[in-house]
Amino acid sequence: MNLDELTKLSGDASFREFYRKKSKKNSIVVYAEKQKKKNLVIYSAINGLLLKKKIKAPKLLSHNYHENYIEIEDLGNHTIYNILKKKNVNKVNYYYKIIFLLKKLQKIKKKKIKTFQNLNYNIPVYSNKILFNESKLFLDWYIPEVINKNKRRELNSKLTVIIQKLLNKLKCREKIFVHRDFHVSNLMEHNKDIYIIDTQDALYGNISYDLASLIDDVRLKTSNKDKEIIFQKFMKVNKYKNFENFKNDFEILSVLRNLKIIGIFQRLYSRDKKKNYLKLIPYAWNLIEYRIKKNKNLVELKTILDKYFLKKR
């Protein structure tokens, strides 16, 4: 890899580094440290699966696993997030396009795929254990920063029980393809199509998860009215019959996801010294407040969060 040909791009919240390669045909070099390079194999394999299903994703151009990098198609700089931040853009129309894209994504059934090493990769199941461990990031990283030490053990114990109860109250049993971080910063407009990026964490899980990630996106504020319009559009497009079960899971997973995000953003600051993410935490709390009051299964969690965190939001 000739560093003289590369321009480093601004990073995201991940461990990867991205470089734009200047040549006749621009490309992106994605680099990961040795202990994380398996992630690149999974990333390219999931992208390959999407492409086979006629879903736009960056193509793998070359790979050098021994040097810890892959080279992928350059999609430019136009994330849907950047487009929707502009004035006079009809956000809802863009979200309608994304809903149809999500429908295509959720039709993927293949669970065993080949990597560029010609090895099998089994896409995991988004189990309650994984969901719990993600929610626990709130306990592990955010609570120590804002709660006195003498109160932490009791609070962590209560939240652990409540989160496990909530996961047991999820009702949609069918496991479908879940991107796991499906929001407008991970969608790009290129050649008038919408491409999906950051696919390496894909799993098979709850049908409502990616919609919760899209609508209750901590990075891009949308009105409550627009949130409801987008939600109803998804229900209409997918013709999902059990509305109450879906709505229950959507609300629970949205709240748990945003607790996880608060934990991740605090970790990015405390461990990685990335301060910019702290400014997003108040809106994550707003999203939690909006959803938590809509579902009777979330009453117990609301009581605890109000008691310990109401003045800290």
Image (tube, helix red, strand yellow):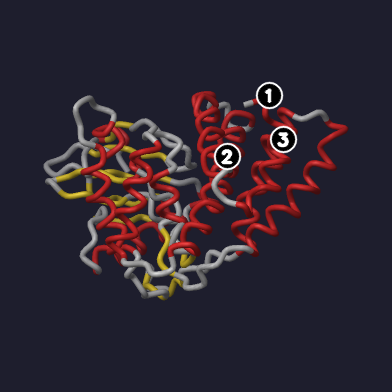
- Sequence-wise first label, 1 or 3: 3
Please state which amino acid type lies under the numbered disc 2. Ile
C-alpha gap between disc 2 and disc 3: 12 Å
Residue 179 position within the rendered picture, expressed as x and y whole percent measured from the top left = 41, 57
C-alpha gap between disc 2 and disc 1: 21 Å
**Residues under numbered marks 2 and 1 in contact, where contact means CB atoms less than 8 Å apart:** no
Which residue is disc 3 drawn over? 143
Label 1 sits on a secondary structure element that is helix
Taking 165 as reference, is 195 left or right? Answer: left
Q: Is residue 60 visible?
A: no
Q: Count of labels shown?
A: 3
> What is the crowding at mark 3: few (fewer than 14 residues within 10 Å), some, or many (at least 20)?
many
- Which of the 4 image quarters holds residue 288? top right
Taking 163 as reference, is 51 left or right? Answer: left
Which residue is disc 2 drawn over? 264
- Sequence-wise first label, 2 or 3: 3
> What is the crowding at mark 1: few (fewer than 14 residues within 10 Å), some, or many (at least 20)?
few
Q: Is residue 5 above or below residue 208?
A: above
Please state which amino acid type lies under the numbered disc 1. Lys
Residue 97 position within the rendered picture, expressed as x and y whole percent measured from the top left = 22, 51
Which residue is disc 1 drawn over? 311
Q: Is residue 301 visible?
A: yes
Q: Is residue 241 above or below residue 4?
A: below
- Sequence-wise first label, 2 or 1: 2
- Picture residue at 79% right of the left edge, 41% below the top: 155
